[in-house]
Image (spheres, grey):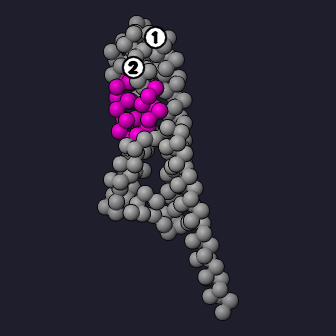
């Protein structure tokens, strides 16, 4: 009888851990929206994930992070050129703004618009300042997205499905 009781406690403990993990995930996602880091585009992206593509969101997020790092480096390199080719810089900004928009990274997109305006004015100093702002916003959303992915993995490891798939 003791073994059954222990087995039951293990299942109850797992269920409790799963409930806590889902609550943490929900609170984390709410904070991302409340802080203006993500918009509804990200919710639409999540809805594209299903049983046939269980890692879709993770793949898109990781690709965004990888591509963004490369684009930010290209932006920095282009702004160090003498003279600065503002058309080239703006092409990188346009690419970054597009990928940020497609994943729903609202604040990154907003600072990309600021950087674009500096390019239009051919303001190298303004571009450099805006690029620092872009880097800070990107680092912030990157960390938050990585935390989101870790919480999703924790939920799956406890036998659950990510909350956005509970529909």
Q: Is residue 26 left or right of residue 103?
A: right
The residue shown at (34%, 60%) is 50
Which disc number belongs to residue 124? 1
Q: Quadrant of residue 65?
A: top left
Q: Nearer the viewer, residue 156 or 114?
A: 114
The answer to whether residue 66 shows anywhere in this view is: no
Q: CA distance from mark 1 to mark 2?
A: 11 Å
The residue shown at (54%, 36%) is 140
Magenta-highlighted residues: 92-111
Residue 116, percent across and down?
A: 39, 19
- Please say whether residue 105 is one of the residues in the magenta stretch: yes
Q: Look at mark 2 in the image and give the residue it sits on.
A: 116
The residue shown at (52%, 17%) is 129
Location of the N terminus by quadrant is bottom right
Residue 28, percent across and down?
A: 55, 49
- Please say whether residue 9 is one of the residues in the magenta stretch: no
The answer to whether residue 5 shows anywhere in this view is: yes
Which disc number belongs to residue 97? none
Image height of 42 relative to 22, above or below: above
């Amino acid at each position: 009888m003791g073994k059954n009781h222990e087995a039951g406690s293990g299942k109850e403990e797992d269920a409790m851990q799963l409930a806590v993990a889902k609550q943490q995930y929900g609170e984390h996602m709410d904070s991302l929206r409340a802080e203006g880091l993500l918009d509804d585009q990200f919710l639409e992206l999540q809805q594209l994930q299903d049983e046939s593509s269980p890692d879709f969101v993770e793949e898109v997020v990781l690709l965004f992070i990888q591509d963004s790092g490369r684009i930010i480096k290209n932006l920095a390199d282009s702004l160090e050129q003498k003279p600065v080719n503002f058309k080239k810089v703006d092409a990188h900004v346009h690419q970054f703004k597009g990928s940020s928009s497609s994943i729903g990274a609202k604040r990154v997109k907003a600072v990309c618009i600021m950087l674009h305006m500096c390019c239009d004015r051919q303001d190298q100093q303004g571009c450099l300042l805006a690029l620092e702002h872009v880097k800070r916003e990107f680092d912030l959303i990157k960390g938050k997205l990585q935390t989101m992915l870790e919480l999703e993995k924790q939920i799956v490891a406890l036998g659950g499905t990510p909350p956005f798939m509970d529909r």
